[in-house]
Image: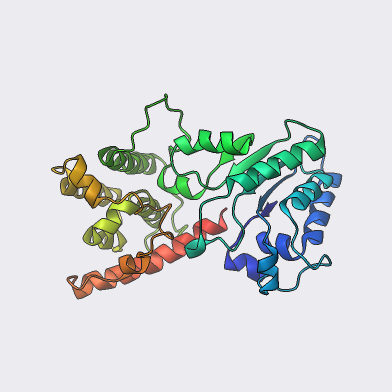
Amino acid sequence: MNLGCPQSIARKGKYGSFLHDEDPEATYNVLSALRSNLPNEIGVTAKIRLPPTQADADSGKLGNMSQTGRPQTIDERMKCLIDCGVDLITVHGRTRFENKVAVKAANWDAIHQATHVAREYSGNSNYPIFANGGIEFDQDIQRCLESTQASGVMSSESLLEVPGLFCYQEEGESDTSAKGLLERQIGYAEMYLDYSTILPPVPGSLGTKGGSFNVIRSHLFKILHRYLEENPSLRSWLGNQELNTIKQARELLVELRLIYENLDEEELRQKSSFDNSWYRRHRRQDAQQHETTPAELTIEERKALAKLRILKLKEERKSKLKL
């Protein structure tokens, strides 16, 4: 049961984190009913966020709260879930208010607290808790496991940009140099285009106009986000509906390589900000500046960028709905 969704559509439907925060009793009734009516071999799992604070409640952010009249603590939340018979719990280390431009670093200490409470209360020292949030680089996985004592780690946003995030790497193998990041991301894009050639996305799954290439376009925007932000002309080219074949996408990758091929590590590092990634797109203070249209662009380029911004918003919304 997904009790972590913080999106506006979850607010309208009163599900996800909104249901858990504002009517926890209904949440636990559903989970208890699932556990009571499903065979034991079918697990019941829950993905949650950290509960809101009393300050959130006092400021009116929670609307009409349930009978308790106050937010649950993380200890109370974990105990209730275990009382419902939930077999595995994933804890996202942020509240539902820490979303989009308000997103902050995940609170691994709170996840550690949740892990401790779950195992002590259940009497199972191996009770499975998964940690979620703050996984940006492969080395973050081990850091998170050590900090939270969780059984496992999950990620969502980062995988859209770095699909190989969970691939096994030998110690010291990870390359976070500017050149290494460039080659890694272009490599992911080339690999994705290879897979899309063999197994194309379902036609029309992101609109009838553009067919399955709109799915490919969406993934390329995320994988190449850092470098498309630095090169508005390439960004507008990818956003142009006239670019609608894998062959054209490969041509874009060739152009991207040409832009950076003569830059050394220091020049590339100065040009390519580490914070300019898809994962950190909401954390940049200058995010609005990146969204404005440069004065030197033509009218056609400005139109293309406007279409791109609309497309990005749609894809963000669709990707969030799948979480």
Looking at the rendered structure, the number of numbered marks drawn on it comes to 0
* Whole-percent x, y for residue 189 in the image: 33, 44
As drawn, 23 above or below 136: below
- Residue 309 is left or right of residue 41, and the answer is left
Residue 256 seen anywhere in this rendered image of the structure: yes
Percent x, y of residue 312: 40, 63
Which of these two is toward me, 304 or 263? 263
Which residue lies most toward the left here?
Answer: 262
Identify the colour scheme used: rainbow
Counting from the top left corner in percent of width and height, residue 248 is at 25, 51
Residue found 17% across the figure and 71% down from its top: 296
Position above or below: 12 against 262: below
Name the residue: 45% across, 60% down: 315
Residue with the most extreme top position: 170
Q: Nearer the viewer, residue 59 or 196?
A: 59
**Residue 236 image-quadrant placement:** bottom left
> Residue at (23%, 51%) from the top-left corner?
271
Q: Tell me: residue 298, above or below residue 93.
A: below
In the foreground, 56 or 185: 56
Residue 253 appears in the rendering: no
The reply, left or right, for residue 131 in relation to residue 310 is right
Q: Tell me where residue 232 appears, x and y as whole percent.
A: 24, 61
